[in-house]
């Protein structure tokens, strides 16, 4: 699972496919609320705000 900014979405998708050999789901964090989980505020690959969850 990766929480990434718009700039790093392709990199996260590539990593996910390399690791799991399957296509991920991409969730827009601006449009989705989670009941029991708060996503990280920053991208896993830089200091920008996280915009997508790749899972």
Image (spheres, rainbow, N blue to C red):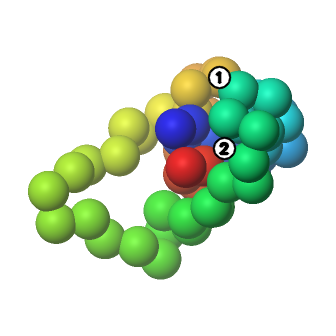
In this rendering, the answer to whether 22 lies above or below 21 is below
Q: Residue at x 35, y 46 (%)?
A: 39
Residue 44 at x, y percent in the picture: 56, 26
In this rendering, would 37 be left or right of 3? left
Q: Which residue is label 1 attached to?
A: 46
Residue 9 at x, y percent in the picture: 76, 45
In this rendering, would 35 be left or right of 15? left
Q: Is the Cβ of the residue at disc 2 closer than 8 Å to that at disc 1?
A: yes
Q: Secondary structure at mark 1?
A: loop
Q: Secondary structure at mark 2?
A: loop
| Sequence-wise first label, 2 or 1 | 2
Q: Residue at x 60, y 49 (%)?
A: 54
Q: Residue at x 47, y 77 (%)?
A: 31
Task: Judge whether residue 50 can be spotted in this image.
Answer: yes
In this rendering, would 26 be left or right of 11? left
In this rendering, the answer to whether 46 lies above or below 14 is above
Residue 40 at x, y percent in the picture: 38, 38
Q: Which residue is label 2 attached to?
A: 5
């Amino acid at each position: 699972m990766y929480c990434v900014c718009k700039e790093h979405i392709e990199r996260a998708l590539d990593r996910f496919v390399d690791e799991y050999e399957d296509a991920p789901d991409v969730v827009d964090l601006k449009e989705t609320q989670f009941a029991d989980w708060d996503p990280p505020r920053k991208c896993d690959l830089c200091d920008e705000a996280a915009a997508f969850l790749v899972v």
